[in-house]
Amino acid sequence: MSLREAFGRRLDPRRGPDQAFTSVEEGGPAVRAGWGEEPPPRKGFFTDTSICIGCKACEVACKEWNGVPQDGIFELLGSSYDNTGALGASTWRHVEFIEQRKPLGGQTTGVTIGVPETAVSPGVMLPDENAGSFGITAGSFGTIPGPVAGPDHSGIDLFGSLKPEPVQDKPLVDLGMPAFDLPSASPDAGERTEFRWLMASNVCKHCTNAGCLDVCPTGALFRTEFGTVVVQDDVCNGCGYCVAGCPFGVIDRRIGDKHQPKDAIANKNHGIAQKCTLCYDRLGEGLTPACAQACPTQSIQFGDVDELRERANLRLADLQAAGVAGAQLYAEDPDGGVGGAGAFFLLLDEPEVYGFPPDPIVTTADLPRMWKNAGFAALGFVALVTTAFVGGRR
Amino acid sequence: MTPGQSDDRDVDNQIGQQKTGQAANPTHDDGPRLRDEGIRAVPGTEGQASATATARRTGGGGRGKGKGKGGGRRKKGRAEELMVPDATFTTYYGRQVVKATPWEADIPFYLFAGGLAGGSSLLGAGADLTGRPNLRRNARITAVLALSASGLALVHDLGRPERFYNMLRVFKPTSPMSMGTWILTAYAPGAVVAGAAEVARLLDVERFLPTRLRFLTSLLDWAARPGGLEAALFAPAVASYTAVLLTDTSTPAWHEAHRELPFVFVGSAAAASGGLAMATSPLVETGPARLLAVIGATVELVVEHQMEKSMGFTAGALHEGPPGRLMKASKILTAVGGAGALLLGRRHRAYAVASGLALVAGSVCTRFGVFEAGQESARDPKYTVVPQRERLDARRAAEAAGVPSGAAPTSVRPGPSADESQTTDPTVDPTPHPQEN
């Protein structure tokens, strides 16, 4: 954000004195929190879901570094490869898998190999009719060049020598495992349909207007010098207010395991609200947070929020130029309902597809009005009782 | 080892079959997928379902508790379908978006007890000033008992009760819980002094004290009136701030009620405290309590009705499932109790006791109903997604219509201006919004 923009925002009459009720401020959230005039640059994540491969290295790295207890024992949720479920007290990174009957951007649909071509059936929902090549039944890949659709390698078998010889007397069983072949390469694969897999690594957004931070009654949640939001587990008394305060459903109160000893890892910080700290301990040492460090595709990018915003906008422009319909930035807008998150996302579909709220607004934005109404109600109560004693003499 | 060489071919087959049955196979037909949808919404376009269809599928609570719907609630469901005809929404495997608070029955009980304490302190102070000794005694004792129960419930609800005092180290206007802690802290001493004086008088503690310590009871007697008045000063805040406690959250059915809920809670507190005073005190002294109860019940019923209208789509949480039953019970009990207090409350003590207790029960149902409705609205993604999607679509439409960026707010800004911009600027949000009061 340029200085001029910052200044303009400061002078914006719509941001009146009532803003004291939220944690909006001009020079980055750390300044308002009392970290002096020149705190370190605000740190955050830019999660580019278009290049996430769903490896869950971020989930593992987060658990390992932060000593987060397990969040379920080998539970199969039946939601694609996502057996984690949701962010919570013991899940600070969560990789989501979404299976959709939508083509990837830049990909021509209706392609089949060995099977007659079919037109796109009218019942299939397409993300955007105007996106370009949909509905064309000509059978070739990548009519629009872009980062998603690469050159056609279908004729080259890079790994052919590595494959085991098929055993003839026993029929092969499809385990549904990833293969190096094209999805429709085998003759019995049937028609090729529109299909795409969205993967995204969800995390605490470290909002500029953080609902959890605003409503915390103990000061356990605080704004760090890096502009992030962190729980002090030795202060939190587990009131649970932040859980409802968060518009994204990120933070939760940890429930320990009664069957294990009190000092077991499962009972670490039992009864205390927990969430991503953006690896506050690592930031202090100038290190990259564990998840971003572990990410093999740089889907999770860590850095100064200002720079990440620029990168995100460039990437979005690239994708849009390549015809990826539905690509959008999420929680990035400084004028948005949470004042621009420290951790924002590039999504390939609408936010609710990923389980994100489509238009979150921090609850404390309405707090002045709430206090006003509660004040009127209290005065009304006094008036009511006075009336009762004046009128109820009989 | 090649896949075919596995010793246990049955296992392989099972896995293979399971895989083809999963939605993971894009070429598979829709049979198993439809069955999946019967359990939970599937992500992406295929997960799009009408809000009401999902409500039917998931029993309105997103938890699949669809059994045992009563005829009355079916009717409500149909009414909702008419209200929201084509609301489609998408979820991530039908999962909730925001989290419900980990609060349990302690908190709705506290909402009731806090209201009862506040109302009783006001009644006690009024009775003290107008010379109604029985009403004063009973109201003050009620207040101190309700206060003690509130305190215990609040501490018990914490994840780490032994650290409750950490709330007393911070004063934070952005946190209604912090403000509530201080409101209670200011309210408690007066209420306790006034209540203790009444208990001491009732038990005739003076008799058991050695002569040297008898001055204590006279001191307590002397302090009872200032204490009671001090408590009455903070009592209205005790009764009304709990509404802010609930509405200052991302829980849809609570937040959307933020305009009216303080008035509903104050009405409920008046009905409960007036009702209990009617039940405990003799007829000759309970004229004010009766009037308070009647007006309180009326306020509660009228404003609650208004609240349901202004909440729009989110009000569905107040009609469905167990919260719906609680809210219905609350309305019936409050209406019956209020009418009984008005028409029969003066005739006979038995009528007064019955209608008073009905009002107390009505207040309990209101608090538990509003609380549980909020929890359900957090667990059911439709209450988070549908209103926000409408807001977002409206804003995008306005942007597409050529509202120049920079000249007008292109998004709902955080801060108190958010509501004004939503309701007064039709280009930003053309969806009908409830009128501000």
Image (spheres, grey):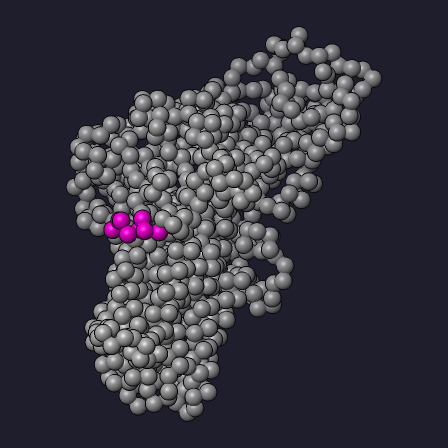
User: Would residue B51 appear left or right of A377 to someone viewing this image?
Assistant: right
Relative image position of residue A322 (x, y in whole percent): 44, 24
Instruction: Depth check: give the residue in front, B292 or A170.
Output: B292
Q: Can see residue A362?
A: no
Which residue is outermost to the bottom?
Answer: B347
Instruction: Depth check: give the residue in front, B150 or A132.
Output: B150
Residue at 50% from the left image edge and 69% from the top image edge: B328
Residue A50 against residue A6 in the figure, above or below:
above
Residue at 35% from the left image edge and 57% from the top image edge: B245
Residue A340: quadrant of the picture: top left
The quadrant the C terminus of chain A occupies is bottom left
The quadrant the N terminus of chain A occupies is top left
Residue at 53% from the left image edge and 44% from the top image edge: A258
Which residue is outermost to the top?
Answer: A161
Which residue is outermost to the right?
Answer: A169
Relative image position of residue A232 (x, y in whole percent): 34, 39
User: Most prominent secondary structure in the magenta stretch?
Assistant: helix
Residue A374: quadrant of the picture: bottom left
Residue B168 against residue B402 in the figure, above or below:
below
Relative image position of residue B9 (x, y in whole percent): 78, 26
User: Would residue B185 appear left or right of A122 to someone viewing this image?
Assistant: left
Q: For the magenta stretch, what is the residue range?
A: B164-171
Magenta run includes residue A285: no
Instruction: Depth check: give the residue in front, B227 or B181.
Output: B227
Instruction: Depth check: give the residue in front, B243 or A307.
Output: B243
Relative image position of residue B107 (x, y in whole percent): 42, 59
**Count of labels shown?**
0
User: Would residue A251 appear left or right of A306 to someone viewing this image?
Assistant: right
Q: Can see residue B95?
A: yes
Residue at 37% from the left image edge and 31% from the top image edge: A278
